[in-house]
Image (cartoon, helix red, strand yellow):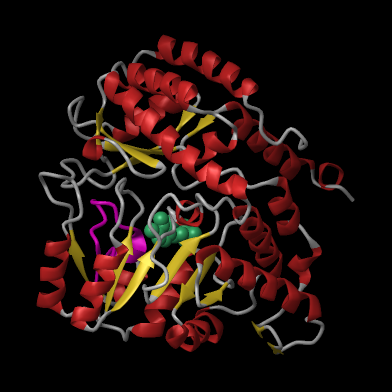
Amino acid sequence: MSLHVQDPAVHKIIQEELHRQQTTVNLIASENYASEAVMEATGSVLTNKYSEGYPKKRYYQGNANADDIELLAIERAKELFGAAHANVQALSGSPANAAIFGAFLEPGDTFLGFTLTGGGHLTHGSHVNFSGKIYSPVHYEVDKETGLIDMEAVRALAKEHKPKMIISGFTAYTRVVDFKAFQEIAEEVGAIHLADISHIGGLVAGGVHPSPFPFTDVVMTTTHKTLRGPRGALIMCKEEHAKAIDKAIFPGYQGGPHDNVTAAKAVAFGEALKPEFKAYSAQIVKNAQALAKSLKDNGIKILTDGTDNHMVILDLCPIGVSLGRPGAVALENAGIITNCNTVPFEPGSPFKPSGIRIGTAMMTTRGMREPEMEQIGKWMASILQDMDNTALQAQVKGEVAALCTRFPVYEGLG
Ligand SMILES: *Cc1c(COP(=O)(O)O)cnc(C)c1O
């Protein structure tokens, strides 16, 4: 029975979400519009299967198709990134990181990661997260003058604290990460290097951000951000770490893999292997640079004065401290979806931050290019400089809706 007949309440909410995604300018840096093929695989009968273990080494019978889909996803992932080993079972980025910690660290062990206000992820040592509760984090910060990660400062901290693991990668940083330098520092102090490329996975796959392969010990990426696949994660590593990673995922941290999502990962990796994905990734970065320029030209301060990736971080301190959330609400009133974010050396607090983080992966998927970015930047600047102007918000909302109809998405749905 189809959903709208069996459960109109759930169906209605999903339709409303489809409408929201179609009629708003979505600039959440961690989101994307997965293809209809990816969503078809996610919604397939593979959701019914239990396949604890790994291909050809399962605990249950009936796994011939689950084996085939997992092996296909693994092969495509390895080809896409040039990785020696891939594990496609991680349910999402955070459990993937938990398993990686579990593979290499004992409780109490020290690791080095990017500070959270500077751009690190919760799983890089927040005191409310497993990473900060079970393990002992030490954090590097961006340089106060340049806003960039200072590799000599990272090296000094590594030498001082002798961490067992060093994490490169971020959730909010707009410049190129020097994975090679991180690996060298890790080798100097005998640490494992984890490159958490959750955000830029698609850009690395598309060849527009330097790759952490083949030299990095372990690489983790989510599959649903710039990579544009289903919600999930992918762990890759050198052959010497393959056993430890696989054992940590299963039986260490997870039970049965989600074979339907594995299938959708295979579809997404297949899409990312096509030449069009290279062009898509390049356009994401061009769009982010055009959006950053438009915001700057219209008076908004941008962290590091620009971007090398899909992301732009607005520093609203010149307008006022702790205006990130009210700014994001004002933008949402105008149909522009963003999230508030801390800025380095945050003068407000994590709950009342002073920045807004945006990304261009979604609008690039819809086919928008530099002229649209310039327009969106103008709208955003005018709203952020006049946050209480609800008439302006209403007016822009109408213009946003008109822009969205010119760049349709999911026309076959609903
Ligand atoms: C998004 C992200 C994660 C976590 O991914 P979830 O799927 O939300 O659990 C981990 N690390 C980084 C750097 C991220 O950006």
In the image, taking residue 65 as reference, residue 152 lies left or right, namely left
Residue at the front extreme? 275
Residue 132 seen in the figure: no
Is residue 116 within the magenta segment? Answer: yes
Q: Whole-percent x and y of residue 169? A: 34, 60
Residue 308 position (above or below residue 391)? below
Q: Quadrant of the C terminus?
A: top right
- Residue, x 19% and y 28% (percent of image)? 320
The quarter of the displayed image where residue 76 is located: bottom right
| x and y percentages locating residue 261 in the rendered image | 66, 63
Q: Between residues 194 and 290, which one lies in front from this camera angle?
A: 290
Residue appearing at x 41%, y 83% in the figure: 103
Front position in the image: 289 or 89: 289
Name the residue: 63% across, 72% down: 75
Q: Which residues are magenta?
A: 112-128
Q: Residue at x 60, y 26 (%)?
A: 23
Q: Is residue 223 left or right of residue 147?
A: right
Q: Is residue 39 left or right of residue 137?
A: right
- Report ligand 1 position as a quadrant: bottom left
Whether residue 301 is situated above or below residue 207 in the rendered picture: above
Left-right relation of 355 to 252? left
